[in-house]
C-alpha cells in the first residue's frame, strides 16, 4: 500500500507538470482526489491492515493528499496568471485609433408635432386622455349623434371586426368616455391613432393620427373656442398667425366650423404651399351638440362645451413643408434625419 501511495504521488506530479489548461487541471484533481479517484480507492483498503499499520499508512496517505492538493493550487495559480496575461494581450487598446461613431436617434416629425401640440394645451390647463383603438360602434358613432345609416358614416368608412366592434375612425370616442366618467369642468385633449378605409396617396392614409380637444363647463361659449384656437395657432405656428372660421356641419357639434390658419410660409399673401389662397385648413371645431351631452349624462341646460380636432400628419406636412404623407411612414433615414 505504501508503494501504491508513493506511485500515486509520482504519477500525479508528472501529470501536473504537463498541464496546459484549467480544464485539464480539474480532470487530474478528480482522477486522484475525487470520490472515485485513485487515492480514495487505496484508502478503502485500509480496513484490511493491522492496527499497527493503519496509523503509518494513514499518515502517508494524508501526506500524499496534501502534496497533490498543494501542487494543484500552485499549478492553478500559474495557469490563471498565464490565461490572464494572454487575455490582456488580446484586449490591448490602441488609444490612437479613431473611435467608431455611433448614430444618435432623433424624434420622428410626427412625434415632434404631437409633443408640441400637447405642450401648448398642457400649458393651458388641459389633461391628456387616452382610450382604446379597437372601439365599440356605440362610442365611435351612436354616442356622437351618428346613428346607423347616417350619411356621415359614409365618409368615415372603417375596418369592422364585427357589427359592433371596429377600429376607431377618430379619437372622439375618448371624449365620450371622459364625459361618462367625469363631471364638469372638463378640459382634455385626446391624441392617438385612428383608422379609415382610405386609399393610400400623397394626402391620405388608412392609418393616421389625430389630436382632439374637449372643454365642458358652465358658460362655455363660441368665443372661448375662438380664443383657444387663436392662442393655439400662435403658439404652434408663430405670433403673426391668424385664424379663420368657415361654417360647416359635424353631427356632434352645433354650430360647427372648419378652421383655417394664415399660411406659415407666406403670412397670408398667397404661395404654392397655400395654393395662393393665403389660408390653410388645419382642423374642425364647434360647440358640443346638446344630444351628445345628454347621452353622457350632462345636462345641456346647465353645461355647454366646445370640441375640436386636427390631423397630426397634415400639421406636420405644413410645418415641415412635406408634400407627400407617405414619406412619414416609409422609415427612410435619409428623409427622417432632416428633422
Image (cartoon, grey):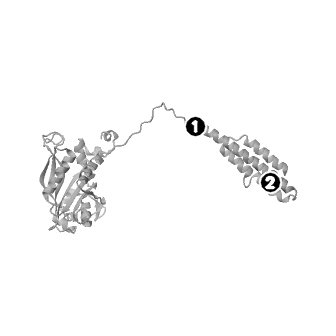
- Residue 88 shows which numbered tag? 1
- Residue 241 shows which numbered tag? none
Pinpoint residue 131: horizontal percent, then vertical percent. 30, 60
The image shows residue 105, relative to residue 185, as above or below, that is above
Q: Is residue 85 left or right of residue 132?
A: right
Instruction: Examine the image and state in which quarter residue 163 appears.
Output: bottom left
Instruction: Examine the image and state in which quarter residue 188 appears.
Output: bottom left
Q: Earlier in the sequence, mark 2 or mark 1?
A: 2
Q: SS class of the residue under badge 1?
A: helix
- Of the 4 image quadrants, the one containing the C terminus is top left
Q: SS class of the residue under badge 2?
A: helix
Pinpoint residue 249: horizontal percent, then vertical percent. 14, 57
Instruction: Examine the image and state in which quarter residue 35 appears.
Output: bottom right
The foreground one among 18 and 51 is 51
Marks 2 and 1, how far apart at CA: 43 Å
Residue at left offset 17%, top offset 52%: 229
The foreground one among 34 and 134 is 34
Which residue is the site of mark 2? Answer: 42
Question: How many neighbours does mark 2 have within 10 angstroms: few (below 14), some (14-19), or many (20 or more)?
Answer: some
Count of marks overlaid on the render: 2
Q: Is residue 275 left or right of residue 71?
A: left
Q: Is residue 309 left or right of residue 51?
A: left
Q: Is residue 203 visible?
A: no
Pinpoint residue 57: horizontal percent, then vertical percent. 83, 53
Q: Is residue 298 left or right of residue 57?
A: left
Residue at left offset 61%, top offset 37%: 85
- Which numbered mark, 2 or 1, is in the foreground of this view? 1
Question: How many neighbours does mark 1 have within 10 angstroms: few (below 14), some (14-19), or many (20 or more)?
Answer: few
The image shows residue 266, relative to residue 248, as above or below, that is above
Looking at the image, do the residues carrying marks 2 and 1 touch, with CB atoms under 8 Å apart? no
Amino acid at each position: 500500500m505504501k508503494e501504491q501511495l508513493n506511485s500515486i504521488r509520482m504519477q500525479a506530479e508528472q501529470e501536473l507538470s504537463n498541464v496546459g489548461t484549467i480544464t485539464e487541471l480539474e480532470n487530474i484533481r478528480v482522477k486522484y482526489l475525487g470520490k472515485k479517484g485513485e487515492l480514495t480507492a487505496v484508502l478503502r483498503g485500509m480496513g484490511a491492515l493491522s492496527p499497527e499499520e493503519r496509523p503509518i499508512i494513514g499518515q502517508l496517505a494524508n501526506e500524499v493528499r496534501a502534496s497533490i492538493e498543494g501542487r494543484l493550487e500552485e499549478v492553478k495559480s500559474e495557469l490563471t496568471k498565464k490565461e490572464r496575461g494572454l487575455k490582456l494581450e488580446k484586449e490591448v487598446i490602441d488609444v490612437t485609433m479613431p473611435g467608431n461613431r455611433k448614430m444618435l436617434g432623433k424624434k420622428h416629425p410626427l412625434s415632434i408635432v404631437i409633443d408640441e401640440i400637447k405642450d401648448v394645451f398642457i400649458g393651458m390647463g388641459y389633461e391628456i386622455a387616452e382610450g382604446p383603438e379597437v372601439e365599440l360602434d356605440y362610442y365611435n358613432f351612436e354616442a356622437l349623434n351618428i346613428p346607423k345609416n347616417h350619411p356621415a358614416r359614409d365618409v368615415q368608412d372603417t375596418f369592422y371586426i364585427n357589427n359592433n366592434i371596429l377600429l376607431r375612425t377618430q379619437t372622439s370616442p375618448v371624449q365620450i368616455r371622459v364625459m361618462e366618467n367625469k363631471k364638469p369642468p372638463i378640459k382634455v385633449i385626446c391624441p392617438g391613432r385612428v383608422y379609415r378605409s382610405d386609399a393610400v396617396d400623397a394626402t391620405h392614409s388608412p392609418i393616421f393620427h389625430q389630436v382632439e380637444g374637449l372643454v365642458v363647463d358652465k358658460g362655455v361659449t363660441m368665443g372661448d373656442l375662438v380664443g383657444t384656437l387663436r392662442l393655439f395657432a400662435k403658439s404652434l405656428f408663430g405670433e403673426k398667425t391668424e385664424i379663420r372660421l368657415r361654417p360647416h356641419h359635424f353631427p356632434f357639434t352645433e354650430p360647427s366650423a372648419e378652421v383655417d390658419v394664415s399660411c406659415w410660409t407666406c403670412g397670408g399673401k398667397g404661395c404654392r404651399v397655400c395654393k395662393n389662397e393665403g389660408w390653410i385648413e388645419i382642423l374642425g371645431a364647434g360647440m358640443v351638440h346638446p344630444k351628445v351631452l345628454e347621452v353622457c349624462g350632462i345636462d345641456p341646460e346647465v353645461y355647454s362645451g366646445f370640441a375640436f380636432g386636427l390631423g397630426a400628419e397634415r400639421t406636420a406636412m405644413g410645418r415641415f413643408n412635406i408634400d407627400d404623407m407617405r414619406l412619414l411612414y416609409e422609415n427612410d433615414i435619409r428623409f427622417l434625419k432632416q428633422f
